[in-house]
Amino acid sequence: MLECRNSSAVRAQVPVALFTMLPRILIADDNAIFRKALRQLLEGADHWEIVEAKGGDEAVTKSVEARPNVIILDLAMPDKDGFAAARDISALLPAAPILMCTLHMSPLVEAEALKSGIRKVFSKTDSSLLVPAIRQLLNPEPPTDQSAVLETTPPTVATDPVVAAPPSDTVPSEAPSDPVPPASPENAA
């Protein structure tokens, strides 16, 4: 057994990346220039590990191997389009969030993407919108439970205009008026 007398010195030599797992993002696009630009955008936005794939088949294989936290697919790729790749990845990794970034934006593409397991479609011209979408997928806000919100009452603060008065033994000066007049004997049946 090895004994480490100065563990802090050893820890200082080990890269921090070994102690923390960076979120992993897979980019699948057949256009090497766009893949590189998207990689630079994402690496500049946060500390994310980027994995690249050149086509749909490679995207499926690398998704299973690398288990990315988020997957970004292009629509038009050789060997397998983004829809087919998304269906395959969704079958193998149902919890993996998939986004699509394509030049071919249309309501029809968006509808087909949703059927294929893709959560959201982005235009390549607006690819910077991927960053907030990825952040939201990596750090989802806890769902709000409406019943809990309705049942929770805020604490009473001295500046609140309505403060509950303690019960008193005094009789109110006026009795509340009865909105319905009493039935007269003539109307009684």
Image (spheres, rainbow, N blue to C red):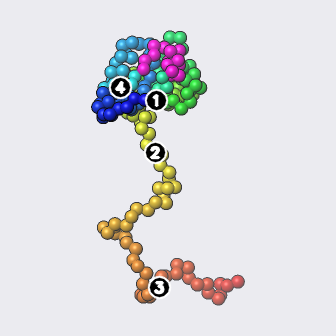
- The residue singled out by tag 4 in the image is 42
Q: Secondary structure at mark 1?
A: loop
Q: Nearer the viewer, mark 3 or mark 2?
A: 2
User: Are the residues at dot 1 and dot 3 in contact (C-beta closer than 8 Å)?
Assistant: no
The mark that comes first in sequence, 3 or 2, is: 2
Looking at the image, is mark 1 or mark 3 nearer the viewer?
1
The circle drawn on residue 142 is 2
Discs 3/4, front: 4
Q: Which residue is mark 3?
A: 175
Amino acid found under the numbered disc labelled 4:
Leu
Spot occupied by residue 74 in the image (x, y as percentages of width and height):
46, 19
Image point 36% across, 21% down: which residue?
39
Asked which secondary structure carries label 3, the reply is loop
Cα–Cα span, label 1 and label 3: 66 Å
Measure how far apart labels 3 and 4 are at the Cα level.
70 Å
Please rate how many residues cluster around mark 2, counting C-alpha atoms within 10 Å: few if below 14, some from 14 to 19, many from 20.
few
Amino acid at the residue labelled 1: Asn
Of marks 1 and 4, which one's residue comes earlier in the chain? 4
Give the amino acid type for the residue marked by disc 2 in the picture: Pro
In the picture, the disc for residue 4 is none
- Residue 37 placement (x, y as % from top left): 34, 18
* Dot 3 and dot 2 residues touching (CB under 8 Å): no
Q: Nearer the viewer, mark 2 or mark 1?
A: 1
| Mark 1 / mark 3, whichever is N-terminal | 1
Q: Amino acid at mark 3?
A: Ala
Q: Position of residue 73 (x, y in %)?
A: 47, 21
Q: Nearer the viewer, residue 66 or 59?
A: 66
Reading the image, the residue beneath label 1 is 69
Mark 2 / mark 1, whichever is N-terminal: 1
